[in-house]
Image (cartoon, helix red, strand yellow):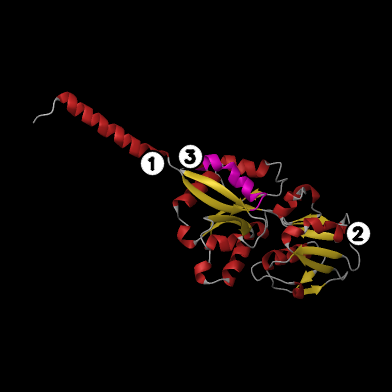
Amino acid sequence: MKLKKSHLALIALVVIVVAAILIVPQLNKTKKILIGATVPPHGNILEAVKEDLKKEGFELEIKVLTDYVTGNPATAAGDLQANYFQHGPYLAQYNESVSEKERLVGAIGVHYEPFGLYAGSKKALDELAEGDHIAIPNDPTNGARALFLLQDAGIIKLKDGLTPQTGATVLDIVENAKNIAIDELNAELIPAALQDVAYAVINGNYATGAGLSPKDDALFLEPSDGEAGKTYTNFIVVKPENENADFVKALKKVLFTQKTYDFILNSPEFKGGVIPVFTVSGK
């Protein structure tokens, strides 16, 4: 039996409508990704690219990390697709402490945060006195970084031959003219302990989070164009099998833009303590 042309047209129309109903939601569907980040500045930077990332097909959810301990295990376990809170030496130290299946990779280098030496009960470096206490972070990589900063400031001297890559501990101090006491504390607790010590070395993100301006308030600051800037780049970190995943490519695309570059440099919340390490095409 032959179908009338009108019937054929109606069938064709139904097929087109059904196909549209099935296909359009798939085209509009975004994939969710969960990234753990400290605030500021990491979470703020991710927040700034949320809408751009949605245009690339990914809906970003940010889980705020309040310490340096939980982000890597959660990423290795798959509870987070990525994390953004750490520099290269910290990641290397973590990878050395875990099994191969728990190791992670730095997929996108985004920014650098200069360490600073801040006033506690003493307001200037020329007030440094015999037996004063200086607080530094107690994790191995940031503790070593703090010791190199104190050496650059002329307060202590470390053994010859040590570098950020080799690390350093308080046992490597060979000169300490004023017998300074080094108090090793959790990095996130140091800003609250400022009045309990003469001075403190504070991570850039915790300094800005406490209302301090690295550019204006630090008594001594790492030079952003020196070796520290290259060594302590902060990365978006993922499992090795995700290093070239579509969501990582999309993140890199939306992060490495003039918009993000300007946001990092000019955000009043960062107070000059966050420096982008990527270059923008055409700059």
Which amino acid, mark 1? Gln
Q: Is residue 87 left or right of residue 247?
A: right
Camera sees residue 171: yes
Instruction: Please report contact status of discs 2 and 3: CB closer than 8 Å, yes or no.
Output: no
Q: Is residue 187 magenta?
A: no
Q: Earlier in the sequence, mark 1 or mark 2?
A: 1
Q: In the figure, 281 relative to 156: above or below?
A: above
Residue 14, image x, y percentages: 26, 31
Which amino acid, mark 2? Glu
Residue 94, image x, y percentages: 60, 67
Residue reaching furthest to the left: 1
The residue at the point 54 percent across, 55 percent down is: 82
Tag 2: Cα neighbours inside 10 Å, few (<14), some, or many (≥20)?
Answer: few
Q: Nearer the viewer, mark 1 or mark 3?
A: 1
What's the magenta region? 38-53
Residue nearer the viewer, 52 or 232: 52
Instruction: Please report contact status of discs 1 and 3: CB closer than 8 Å, yes or no.
Output: no
Q: In the figure, 165 relative to 214: above or below?
A: below
Residue reaching furthest to the top: 6
Camera sees residue 278: no
**Residue named by callout 2:** 127
Task: Identify the image quadrant of the C terminus.
Answer: top right
Residue nearer the viewer, 119 or 44: 44
Distance between the alpha carbons at the discs numbered 2 and 3: 54 Å
Which amino acid, mark 3? Lys
**Residue named by callout 3:** 55
Tag 1: Cα neighbours inside 10 Å, few (<14), some, or many (≥20)?
Answer: few
The secondary structure that dominates the magenta segment is: helix
Residue 239, image x, y percentages: 50, 61
